[in-house]
Image: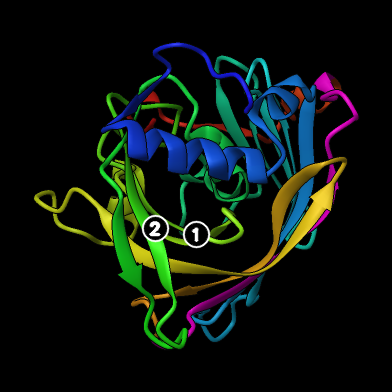
Amino acid sequence: MCSHIAGATDYANTQTKAVIEAMVDAHGGIDKWRSIPAISFDAIMHNNYHAKHELAWWVARESIDQQTKQVHQNWYLSDAEIAYDGEDVWSRNWNKVNPPTAMLYFFYYFINLPFITQDEGVVLSEVKEFAWPGHGGKVYHEVKMTFKERPVIGKSALDYFVLYIDPITNLLAGYQYAIGNRAMLDALGQPPERKLFGPLWRYIVKNQTVDGLVFPAAFRTMPEADERIVGNHIITDIDISTPFDKTLLSMPKDAIVDNVANR
């Protein structure tokens, strides 16, 4: 059994603790994940709701420092960048609806969810059982993951995930997610009284193992558990051994600094 920081995670009971720690171990263990200097990956998404003259593919090379949580994203297919240098969030040539703050840790959370359950301020509910429609009656462990306060820039205390864990392999099979980033809600034209975008459902189609850690390789997004697919995603070229390149954080002259109120 891997070791965990005492008090970092708020488990509903001993069963929740056992289920979540088994999941973390199945993905390679929290100690190994915390020991990596940074994580870099290519996130590739096909957006089924792209506008007529908009590029349907969202493609970025993302790098996140594990200690400082500094971020650089190279949206090379769109000639754009997003970064967080530890003080400011800035972007260059960013023209998509999603605000830069909402994108900072968007895919970082999705590919690291099992390990993020061990972050301070995470609250994990009692375990329920869920038979995922279309999965031949297979039953998964269901645990809701919430936050005591906003965990990082771009997320809110209202954000949540509902984790679906395979009881045989202990791997994360899928999840629901909801986002409370106000700038994101405003960009999507949501009224002030609406506090969350979602939930949407994610099913992990394929996993990959990198230096002993298990990450998703492909997943799909749906409005309901077994409905139409509204997004297809792949995660490729994961690097967990190369330190974060801080030279990437040098702000270009044409960069735009994000409004603090949108964080």
Identify the image quadrant of residue 124.
Answer: top left
Secondary structure under badge 2? strand
Outermost left residue: 193
Q: In what quadrant of the picture does the C terminus appear? A: top left
Q: Is residue 58 left or right of residue 138?
A: right
Q: Is residue 45 left or right of residue 259?
A: right
Identify the image quadrant of residue 205.
Answer: bottom right
* Residue drawn at x 26%, y 33% as measured from the top left: 12
Identify the image quadrant of residue 82.
Answer: top right
| Amino acid at pointer 2 | His
User: Does the residue at mark 2 contact the one at mark 1 (Cβ under 8 Å)?
Assistant: yes
Q: Is residue 35 above or below residue 262?
A: above
Residue 256: assigned label: none
Residue 10 image position (x, y, % from top left):
32, 25
* Residue drawn at x 85%, y 21% as measured from the top left: 247
Outermost top residue: 6
Pointer 2 residue:
141
Q: Is residue 41 shown in magenta?
A: no
Residue 167: assigned label: 1
Task: Depth check: give the residue in front, 59 or 69.
Answer: 69
Secondary structure under badge 1? loop
| Amino acid at pointer 1 | Pro
* Residue drawn at x 65%, y 32% as measured from the top left: 83
Q: Which residues are the magenta region?
A: 227-246
Mark 2 and mark 1 lie on one chain; the one further toward the N terminus is: 2
Other-residue count near label 2 (Cα within 10 Å), few / some / many at <14 / 14–19 / ≥20 = many
Tell me, yes or no, if residue 26 can be seen here: yes
* Residue drawn at x 45%, y 11% as measured from the top left: 6
Q: Is residue 234 shown in magenta?
A: yes
Q: In what quadrant of the picture does the N terminus appear? A: top right
Residue 90 image position (x, y, % from top left):
59, 31
Residue 21 image position (x, y, % from top left):
52, 35
